[in-house]
Amino acid sequence: MMEALDQAWQQLHTFSGWEALATLLGLAYIVFAIRESLWAWPCAFFSTLIYTWLFWDGQLPMQALLNAYYLIMAIYGFWLWSTHPPSPTPARHATPLKVHRLKTWQHGVFLTLGSLLTIVVVQAMQSFELSRAPWLDAGVTVFSMLNTYLMARKVLENWLYWLVINSAAMWLYWDNGFYFTVLMFAVYFVMAVIGFFQWRQSARDAAAKHSGNLHPAHSG
């Protein structure tokens, strides 16, 4: 335990300015996402742009690939949220993008697709000996990629999936000695809990407003 704490302290001392900036932007991304703010996606874009370069320079190709994918999703998320705001506006007549839940069969598709892709990635990683924990590494990578899409679509359960993914990621990073990164993911875990309750309330408020519009109160 003391050895782990000592390594974590050493990592803190080697924490680069670029890594610090990427971390802060990543935290800002989650805060803005919880608030359903469009600013979430510019923060995500620049955070993942920095991380893509850092991981590639650090010879971590899978993590670099994951963050390159996040770059694309940041652009998609910005476009989606900007063209489909939570509430209709006079200038925009697009269907509002509101927090919603997946149906049971959609969860089944998500989990099945994620599991199959994980198996494929594991086979590739084992062939090239790319990871010391291929199943955990591949699972975290694949489900992170799929779940980012759910987040962009404002699926409520994305926060619950993040709880599982971040827990697995913390185990992966701890096992590989990235103790400071574990601390960051612990913060992400807490923020995912906050995000779930915030989005659930947003969905309830939207449903109540919709119900009120369908059944307006009559006076007299």
Image (cartoon, rainbow, N blue to C red):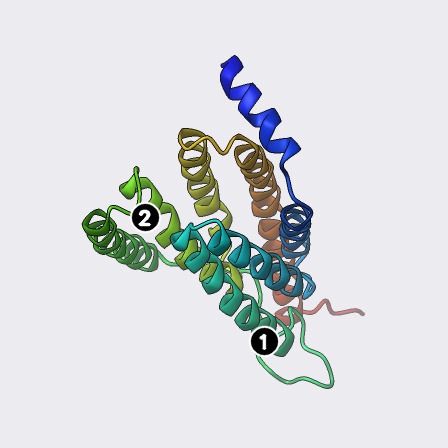
The image shows residue 64, relative to residue 126, as above or below, that is below
Q: How many other residues sit within 10 Å of disc 1, few (<14), some (14-19) or many (≥20)? A: some
Image quarter hosting the C terminus: bottom right
Question: Which quarter of the figure has residue 116?
Answer: bottom left
Instruction: Please tell me which of labels 1 and 2 falls first in the chain.
Output: 1
Residue 82 in picture, x, y percent from top left:
64, 75
Mark on residue 138? 2
* CB atoms of marks 1 and 2 within 8 Å: no
The image shows residue 65, relative to residue 93, as above or below, that is above
Q: Residue at x 30, y 58 (%)?
A: 105
Q: CA distance from mark 1 to mark 2?
A: 28 Å
Judge left or right: residue 47 versus residue 161.
right
Q: Residue at x 66, y 51 (%)?
A: 18
Q: Observer-nearest residue: 159 or 207?
A: 159
Residue 3 in picture, x, y percent from top left:
50, 16
Question: Which quarter of the figure has residue 106?
Answer: bottom left
The image shows residue 2, relative to residue 193, as above or below, that is above
Residue 85 in picture, x, y percent from top left:
65, 72
Residue 124 in picture, x, y percent from top left:
22, 54
Judge left or right: residue 119 versus residue 29.
left
Q: Residue at x 32, y 40 (%)?
A: 136
Amino acid type, label 2: Ala
Query: Quick one: SS at disc 2?
Result: helix
Q: Observer-nearest residue: 77 or 184?
A: 184
> Closer to the observer: label 1 or label 2?
2
Q: Is residue 7 visible?
A: yes
Residue to which mark 1 is pinned:
79
Question: Which quarter of the figure has residue 12?
Answer: top right
Q: Residue at x 43, y 51 (%)?
A: 59
Amino acid type, label 1: Trp
Query: Quick one: SS at disc 1?
Result: helix
